[in-house]
Image: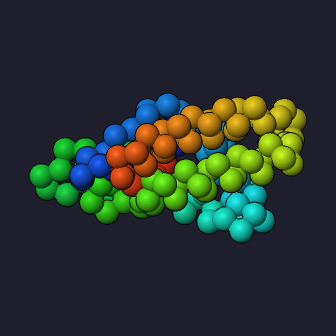
């Protein structure tokens, strides 16, 4: 069982997800947070919601009447304005490319991180065009 990130948008109370596993972003979240801080950005982990992970680890239960973790995340989750997410992710991606940041000790996941950030940026742009909110869900 591994944990990944999924990009989500919140539009009029409904969660939409790209459902694309972003394993490299989750695996290197601490390093991405450090890069964010050094660039004067909000840490990426601050826009990651753990509702689904907590549910799958039996740390929380769905309230009566809720059928999915998406409903709970829509109501109580961590969200950011999608346009702010685009700016954050684009700036982070530019930093990674400029610095040619290495991700990993034995093997370098640079390309995977760049690809996953690019996918998330496209998803966040689409969400921003609908005046939506954005987050990454930690999915197990």
Question: Which residue is located at x 49 percent, y 49 percent?
Answer: 136
Q: Residue furthest left?
A: 65
Residue 129 placement: quadrant: top left
Q: Position of residue 43 (x, y in %)?
A: 63, 63
Q: Is residue 100 left or right of residue 82?
A: right
Instruction: Say which of 133 and 19 sits in front.
Output: 133
Residue 54 at least partly seen: no
Whole-percent x, y for residue 85 in the image: 53, 54
84, above or below 110, in the image: below
Left or right: residue 46 versus residue 14 is: right
The answer to whether residue 133 is above or below residue 8 is below
- Residue 83 horizontal/vertical position (percent): 48, 54
Residue located at (45% from left, 53% from top): 82
Q: Tell me, yes or no, if residue 10 can be seen here.
A: yes
* Residue 108 percent coordinates (x, y): 83, 35
Residue found 86% across the figure and 43% down from its top: 100
| Label total for image | 0
């Amino acid at each position: 069982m591994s944990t990944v990130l999924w990009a989500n948008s919140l539009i009029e109370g409904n969660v939409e997800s790209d459902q694309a596993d972003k394993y490299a972003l989750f695996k290197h979240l601490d390093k991405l947070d450090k890069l964010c801080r050094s660039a004067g950005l909000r840490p990426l982990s601050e826009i990651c919601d753990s509702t689904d992970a907590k549910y799958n680890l039996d740390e929380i239960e769905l309230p009566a009447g809720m059928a999915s973790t998406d409903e709970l995340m829509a109501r109580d989750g961590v969200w950011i304005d999608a346009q702010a997410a685009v700016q954050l992710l684009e700036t982070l991606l530019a930093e990674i490319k400029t610095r040619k940041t290495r991700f990993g000790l034995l093997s370098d996941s640079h390309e995977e991180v760049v690809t996953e950030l690019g996918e998330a940026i496209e998803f966040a742009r689409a969400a921003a065009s609908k005046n939506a909110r954005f987050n990454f869900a930690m999915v197990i």
